[in-house]
Amino acid sequence: MAFPKIRMRRLRSTSAMRRLVRQTSLSIDDLVYPLFVRDGQRLKEPIKSMTDCFHFSPDTVAAEAAEVASLGIPAVLLFGLPGKKDETGSEAWAEAGVVQRSIKEIKKAATELLVITDVCLCAYTEHGHCGMIKDGKIDNDSTCELLAKMALSHAQAGADIVAPSDMMDGRVSYIRQTLEQNGFHGTAIMSYAAKFASAFYGPFRDAVESAPSFGDRKSYQMDPANSDQAMAEIALDIEEGADIVMVKPALPYLDIICRARQRFDCPIAAYNVSGEYMMLNSAAQAGLLDKGPAMLEMLTAIKRAGADIIISYFAKDVAKRI
Ligand code: PBG
């Protein structure tokens, strides 16, 4: 008879006891904070669809990045909203593009902070798709060439890590070869390896005006119902040269994070996306949830599932609380 020899509550009796046996602790070192930059000057405009998030311009994002660094957060992830969109998304690889200029400003203001850049065309194309359109379909290989150009221009501007989020086949390989050929041996690739066609990206698409003008992203992003395919995607990205692989979104996909952790040895990132962020914010605003503890519980769960790196709009807030 186990009871009373075993009483599980003994190890939960006090705060010190709970600390002693705690298996997972969230650390500031795990966090990445996303930042949105758009063309302009002296901008700090609230993003309507995302509480406490702002559009910065290249001049103002530097101060924000410095604040992020002063909180001890090791990295930011940059998203750009170009002045003008076109058919191919050409602003994406422009030397004076909004992300390229922002990287340089951030590097001056916060030398130790890692700059990660999102590599994808959806915010730069008129149609809002992540790739080139040929005969009404998203063309894989021509998209990869442009993504490689975009990644290279980010590396040239000083990005430490490039993060392709488009889900084209072979893009990591194209990017890795392009970086190597141009001497950027040290630029890391964090691939959005298992990225699902999720309804949880809604608030983000409003923020960067990237909702596709026709159709959806289901021919390139993964079907939420699949798990084995996620393992295949991750394995391929590692083979092609990814240093870090990502699962996205995070909360509805904890099982994928957990499987990936057991199977692969490289660092695993999880993206706590805009919809997850706003779900909690909206509930807190409606007085239904206590935001602080709920956000810590959310991020702890993502870490417990096996994520080494957590990308979250809560990062600054969490860093102040732990
Ligand atoms: C670009 C991209 C998206 C997100 C990150 N990179 C949107 C999408 O794929 O539609 C979503 C991030 C978020 O929701 O917080 N492809």
Image (tube, grey):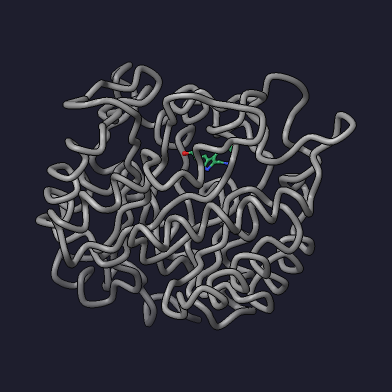
Horizontally, is 205 left or right of 79 in the view?
Answer: right
* The C terminus: image quadrant: bottom left
Which residue is farthest right?
A: 135
Of the pair 318 and 82, the residue shown nearer to us = 82
Residue 49 spot, x, y in % from top left: 40, 20
How many numbered marks have been drawn onto this rendered protein structure?
0
Horizontally, is 38 left or right of 143 in the view?
Answer: left
Residue 255 spot, x, y in % from top left: 62, 59
Query: Residue sitting at 64 percent across and 50 percent down?
Result: 146
Residue 93 spot, x, y in % from top left: 50, 47
Is 90 rendered above or below residue 30? above
- Quarter occupied by residue 149: bottom right
Query: Residue sitting at 61 percent across and 30 percent down?
Result: 125
- Quarter occupied by residue 4: bottom left
Of the pair 87 and 318, the residue shown nearer to us = 87
Query: Residue sitting at 37 percent across and 53 percent down?
Result: 299
Query: Residue sitting at 62 percent across and 73 percent down?
Result: 177
Is 189 rendered above or below residue 192? below
Of the pair 302 and 77, the residue shown nearer to us = 77
Is 277 rendered above or below residue 287? below
> Image quadrant of ligand 1?
top right
Residue 221 spot, x, y in % from top left: 71, 45
